[in-house]
Amino acid sequence: MLTETQIKCISLMITENKTQKQIAKEINITEKTICKWKKDMEFKEEIQRQMKENFGSLAVEAQQELKKLLKSKNENIKIQAIKDVLDRAGYKPIDKTEISGTGIVQLVDDVNE
């Protein structure tokens, strides 16, 4: 089980974006200790868990910003935002369609008829 100090260290690594040196000084440990902790599987798993949690909270902000971009005065930005929303909603256009078969295809030119 991780200690309170280890949890604090991970939190500072993820949310504060501090260096190992800064973190070590702030929580009164050595950089060598942080290096040792980073090799521990439980410590690594907690880093991953906190990163996932942190990014999850950013998703709400990202969606709000994307909504703002949908109303942009710049048409290129607006179009990219629209495409992104549609792609994420599962409405991505099909790039190509492959037709296969062994039958005969007859093209009829009916322009002049």
Image (tube, helix red, strand yellow):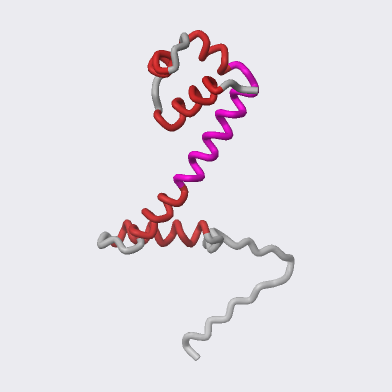
Question: What residue lies at 48% left-to-right and 62% top-to-bottom?
Answer: 86
Magenta segment, prevailing SS (helix, strand or loop): helix
Q: Quadrant of residue 36?
A: top right
Percent coordinates x, y for residue 72 in the rendering: 29, 61
Q: Is residue 1 left or right of residue 26?
A: right
Please, is residue 111 above or below residue 1 in the view? Answer: below
How many discs mark residues in the rendered view?
A: 0
View extreme (right): residue: 102
For the magenta stretch, what is the residue range?
39-58
Percent coordinates x, y for residue 52 in the rendering: 54, 38
Q: Nearer the viewer, residue 78 or 11?
A: 11
Q: Is residue 42 magenta?
A: yes
Q: Is residue 90 left or right of residue 99?
A: left
Please, is residue 92 above or below residue 106 in the view? Answer: above
Q: Quadrant of the N terminus?
A: top right
Question: What residue lies at 41% left-to-right and 62% top-to-bottom?
Answer: 82
Q: Is residue 27 magenta?
A: no
Q: Quadrant of residue 44?
A: top right
Q: Nearer the viewer, residue 39 or 107?
A: 39
Question: What residue lies at 44% left-to-right and 26% top-to-bottom?
Answer: 12
Percent coordinates x, y for residue 68 in the rendering: 34, 59
Q: Is residue 52 left or right of residue 85?
A: right
Percent coordinates x, y for residue 11 in the rendering: 48, 29
Question: What residue lies at 40% left-to-right and 19% top-to-bottom?
Answer: 19
Q: Nearer the viewer, residue 6 or 91?
A: 6
Q: Nearer the viewer, residue 84 or 113?
A: 84
View extreme (bottom): residue: 113
View extreme (front): residue: 4
Q: Quadrant of residue 105?
A: bottom right
